[in-house]
Amino acid sequence: MIAYNDDFIIKIDVVIITYDRLDMVRSCLESLSNSISNFNIQILFGFNGSSSDFIDEVKDYVRRVNLQGRVHFFYNTGQLPGAARNQILKKSFADWIFFCDDDIILPNFFFAIFFKLLKKNSTVNVFGGPNLTPEFSSPIEQAQGIALGLFTVTGPVSNRYSSSSSNNKNSIYSLTLCNLFWKRSDYLFPNDFYCGEELHLLTRTPNPFLSSAELSVFHFRRKNWSDFFRQTLKYGIGRTEQSILMLTLLFLVVCILLCLSAAVNTMLIFGYFSCILTEVCICKLKNKNKVSFFLIFTAAFIIQFGYCIGLCVGLLRRLKK
């Protein structure tokens, strides 16, 4: 239990789902050990189709970072993310759930900051913050983080990847499941969503929400372009599973593009990527980062291409159901 005073007592469970990513899981567990050291917070750790060797390695590392007794393990044979989390949520009786990806690193005072924000915003039902690229990341990984934070590339969700983003209230697009405090309710995730199940949960959770840069975490990016492309493809597929509105808009856009001439379509595409180029240039001038212009633009192109392909694949999947 956590107590600020006699009338402010809450209980928090951390929910993590993992497969077989040992190095990332180790970094995540070490950061969790440091950030919860002063609090009685429990970790509900789900192995989702993991190998026995990986499970043994994780359990050994839990003992090494002094988390034994705080971590409760769950096992399944490889479910979709929402179903795997639901299995754990049904066993939790905490007031708040912190959803944590296995590839993030938390700052030491992360939970202390959450309690401070909660005390000031006691009516808020969801808290979250950006996920930033670790400073020790490779140039390709840093380029991914920069491109994800560009408004011309990812639109309103760009706030998820920028430490300069101001506090956002009641915007589900500034919140992400890798770093999310959710006030416990009876709602669960859809069991059949391939990706993006958090928006389904958030649309059923009443306002207010708060996304704060103070709750930033560090998130490992993909180590190569092919893995990054697969990630953006997955996000595109996931978005079509979230709402009929997205499918309708996608269908309308495709119909409009088919009706336009090749010359007009070429001009639209050229104009759009010119806007991306402009924002990349502005970003380079403002931040003076060492990542090359070419790498950032490559990451931006992969996001657009992979996401669009994912939307089309998702649309076909929905039509077959």
Image (tube, helix red, strand yellow):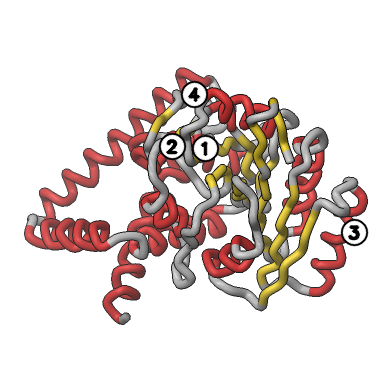
Q: Nearer the viewer, mark 2 or mark 3?
A: 2
Return the disc, 2 or 4, that comes first in the chain's sequence: 4
Q: Earlier in the sequence, mark 1 or mark 4?
A: 1
Q: Is residue 82 above or below residue 64?
A: below
Where residue 219 sits, quadrant-wise, is: top right
Q: Earlier in the sequence, mark 4 or mark 3?
A: 3
Residue 58 coordinates in the image, percent (x, y): 82, 60
Mark 1 vs 2: CB contact within 8 A: yes
Q: Between residue 62 and residue 89, name the one nearer to us.
A: 89
Q: Amino acid at mark 3?
A: Asp
Name the element at disc 2: strand
Q: Is residue 45 above or below residue 8?
A: below
Q: Secondary structure at mark 1?
A: strand
Q: In the rendered structure, which amino acid carries the disc numbered 1? A: Phe
Pointer 3 local density, CA inside 10 Å: few below 14, some 14–19, many at least 20? few
The reply to whether residue 309 is in sight is no
Which labelled disc corresponds to residue 164?
4
Q: CA distance from mark 3 to mark 1?
A: 32 Å
The residue that label 1 is drawn on is 127
**How far apart are the two marked residues, 2 and 3, measured between alpha carbons?**
37 Å
Instruction: Please give the name of the residue rendered at 58% of the width and 73% of the height, measured from the top-left corner.
Output: 79
Picture quadrant where residue 41 is located:
top right
Tell me, yes or no, whether the two marked residues, 2 and 3, touch with CB atoms within 8 Å.
no
Q: Residue tagged by mark 3?
A: 60
Picture residue at 44% right of the left edge, 61% below the top: 233
Measured as percent of width and height from the top left, residue 298 is found at 45, 45
Mark 2, residues whose alpha carbon is within 10 Å: few (<14), some, or many (≥20)? Answer: many
Nearest to viewer (mark 1 / mark 4): 1
Mark 1 vs mark 2, CA separation in Å: 6 Å
Q: Quick one: SS at disc 4?
A: loop
